[in-house]
Image (spheres, grey):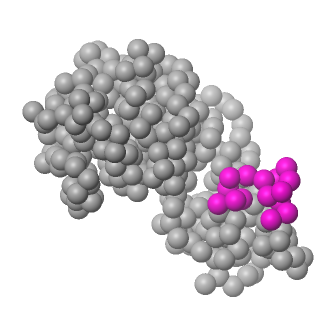
Amino acid sequence: MMERNDHKGTVGFVGLGTMGREMALNLLKAGYAVRAYDVRKEAVDPLFSHGAAGAESLADAVRDADIVISMLPDTPQVEEIVYGEGGLLASPPRGRLFVDMSTISPVAVRRMHADLKAADIAFLDAPVSGGPVGAKNASLSIMVGGERDAFLRAEPVFRAMGTTITHVGEAGAGQTVKLCNQLVCAINIQAICEALALGRASGVDLGQLRNVLLGGSAASWMLERLGPAMIAGDDSAGFRIDLMLKDLRLVQEQALSLSVPLPASALVTSQYVEARAHGEGTNGNQALFRVYDRMTNQTVA
């Protein structure tokens, strides 16, 4: 059994991508023992110098954990944590508590919640907002669905990774709130692209345009953070086009299942599809502006 760090407990952390790595580091800083696992073994290596232990398998990561956390790309990967070889149903964690912080299907969440509950394992869906910067600074917004008792058990762990921690309802509610967040973000990015495209065509200095918009009611986190990259043509990845498109797909699936029309979400989804079709999938969200470059016959580097 792994020794605990400062008696705060052991976290089995699965998924050490851009977000997961920073979240796991913040748990270590807060005094938790972390047993880390990723299908890419090299993703775990940077955590060793900070005191993390590596797991040789999924079962090795989860078996002795007081809480298991996953941060993975999409629904199938989370389902593998639950149902796969060495997964939670086959190797229940010591603490009988699983928290998924990915952005996945609310329908799948409710199904996994029921199956885990039948095996006496509590499950919280706790997606996050704040991006890589929020993950690094432990300032994420965390929206949590599931039983209240499980939320209270996990809350101290959430406090090591975020600043706005909200229990939003039953299983699947966390994912629903996150999808609402993502549709607002995507449409906001689209609106910024359109404003910059109109300003550029009109001969307005885009830096000045951005500064003016930030000083008024059009101000937003996206304009502040992504606006300069759009103007500079910087497509470096933070939150990638592919990931936002995955989230918008989940938005559309949820809306269709409930017969809720989302015309603006449908439009921006089609533009993300266009961006990926032109090889922008691994670029940051600001690369959506390249869609407007193409539509207005601007030179794209």
Quadrant where the image shows the C terminus: bottom right
Q: Is residue 243 above or below residue 13?
A: below
Residue 263 within the segment the image draws in magenta: no
Residue in view at x 54 percent, y 60 percent: 241
Q: Which segment is the magenta one?
A: 211-225
- Choose between 142 and 188: the one closer to the eye: 142
As drawn, is 180 to the left or to the right of 223?
left
Q: Classify residue 75 as left or right of residue 274.
A: left
**Image quadrant of residue 197?**
bottom right
Q: In the rendering, at what x and y percent does residue 31 appear?
A: 30, 38
Looking at the picture, tell me which residue is in the foreground, 53 or 270.
Answer: 53
**Residue visible at 30% across and 24% down in the picture:** 97
Tell me the residue at 22%/48% (across/down): 52
Prevailing secondary structure of the magenta residues: helix
- In the displayed structure, 194 sits above or below 256; it is below
Percent x, y for residue 273?
59, 60
Q: How many numbered discs?
A: 0
Between 163 and 119, the residue placed more toward the observer is 163
Percent of width and height locating residue 36: 24, 46
121 left or right of 145 in image? left
Q: Residue furthest right?
A: 202
Q: Nearer the viewer, residue 261 or 290?
A: 290
From where the camera sits, is residue 128 visible? no
Q: Is residue 199 above or below residue 92?
A: below
Residue extending furthest toward the left: 1
Q: Is residue 12 left or right of residue 128?
A: left
